[in-house]
Amino acid sequence: MSSPTQQLCTFTHTLTLPSIPTSILSRTKSILLDGLGSGLLSSPLPWSQRALTALLSLDPSPGPCTLLGHPNPISAPTAALLNSSFIQGFELDDYHSLAPVHGASLVLPALLATAELLRYTEGRAVSGEELLVAAVVGLEVGPRVGMGCGGADILARGWHSGAVFGGPAVALAVGRLLGLGERELEWAVGHAATQAGGLMSAQFGSMGKRMQHGYAARNGLTAAFLARAGYTGIERVLEREYGGFFAAFNPESMTEGSKAVESVCEGLGERWEIENVIVKPAYGTMAATHAPIDCVARLQEENGWLKGREAVEKIEAVKVELGHAAFKHGGFKSEHWPLEPTEAQMSTAFAVATQLFDGEVLPTSFGPATIKRDEIRELMNRIECINQTAWDDTATFRTIVTVGLKRGGVLEAEAENPKGIKPKLSNGEIVEKFRHITKGLIEDERASKIEDLVTALDILDSIDELMRALKGEVKSII
């Protein structure tokens, strides 16, 4: 049997539109639409503008590629990096429930940049079908590579999961769009894998967390073009025992009895990991905070008084019980105040406090005034996150929130999974989310055109009209 690296390359090279189930094609289009909405919303935000200023000073020459929410075209590598950072810019985008990776932020920017570059350099119009099949490749491969890296456990070890294993997925997606053969695809995976990295300490107040998937998008793009030119890359890179990808990022995968490497290609082309891609509600926070938010929201539904300043004054303490990965990711105690938006969006305590005060956690919760409220800080001091070690291996998102009252008694709610995982957002609900997060930021007619074009992606002769709709001004939500 061929190696996992080679099997992924064969899958990429031989995949056809008719071989992809209709449900997977529909879900992929919904994921792409969600990514575009997330990117458009984030494009004018202050940290996005700082990134734009920095990278245009480094790469000032105009190029052929669209930057979401901006009128002027830029180079392909910079477009891939910035558009990815925009999609990741407000924690609104998708993630995989078992191998955390933000697929749209990886695949979509690199594919759009490639398509526009091909139009510019070769006069080739990339069809919607070509883009859609390549997107299926990237969205399917990313989580599978992540399984070989240990899935969500890589977060607990301090690696930014999707930034680590996203590059090979992008390389294969772009390679598919470029029409690379299996050997060149394997080189592309090798080039992408050797550039992998990303540290989760970026979540503590750093704007850089928003850009780390962008590095993987840019690196995967570069990797595919290197391979296209015949620049050879590491072969069998994923499974090599010395210096290989899984050996470096998940040493246990090389031990006797481990099924990690074997799981990467299990059911490939028959069982679809795209079905496990989760599209978030419009919370604007990191995924591991969603179950705690849902628990508090349920308590508020059951106890109508549990919202606002008067309610918070009646609370003695709040305990939030979490599994290992969720605790390491969001259960930290903040060391300073006020929080930067990135750290606030990562913080379970901030999310729970905001839900208790406002009855919602939305992108507007992270504006300059709302994020600095002293009452939120004071309540956060009464919120304790605890790692329930018994859940570590079996329940990634399981959460129990217990609210202790000053008058005596407790309120308690439990969630095995957050909304978005169970129940999943339907494709219709994802469209509603897109409409909701773009409302007032771009013209309704423009939003409808983007929605219609993505929905009809598989029958578009060219994606040119979609790219034109993505240009132009976007108002800031903050």
Image: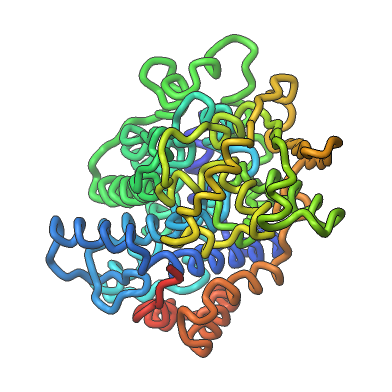
Name the quadrant containing residue 231.
Answer: top left
Q: How many marks?
A: 0
* Image quadrant occupied by the N terminus: top right
Question: Which x, y percent locates residue 3?
Answer: 51, 29
Residue visible at 35% across and 80% down? 473
Q: Residue furthest bottom?
A: 445
Vertical side of 299 occupied by 358: above or below: below
Vertical order, 236 against 115 (above or below): above
How far across and down, in percent of the image, does residue 123 sit?
28, 76
Q: Is residue 119 visible?
A: yes
Q: In this image, 432 relative to 231: left or right?
A: right
> Could one spot residue 138 in this view of the protein?
no
Q: Residue at x 73, y 37 (%)?
A: 399
Who's the residue at 31% across and 46% down the image? 219
Residue 207 in percent (x, y) is at 35, 48
Q: Residue at x 66, y 48 (%)?
A: 290
Relative side of 319 to 370, left or right: right
| Quadrant assignment for the C terminus | bottom left
Q: Is residue 347 above or below residue 83?
A: above
Residue 35 vs residue 126, the one in the foreground: 35
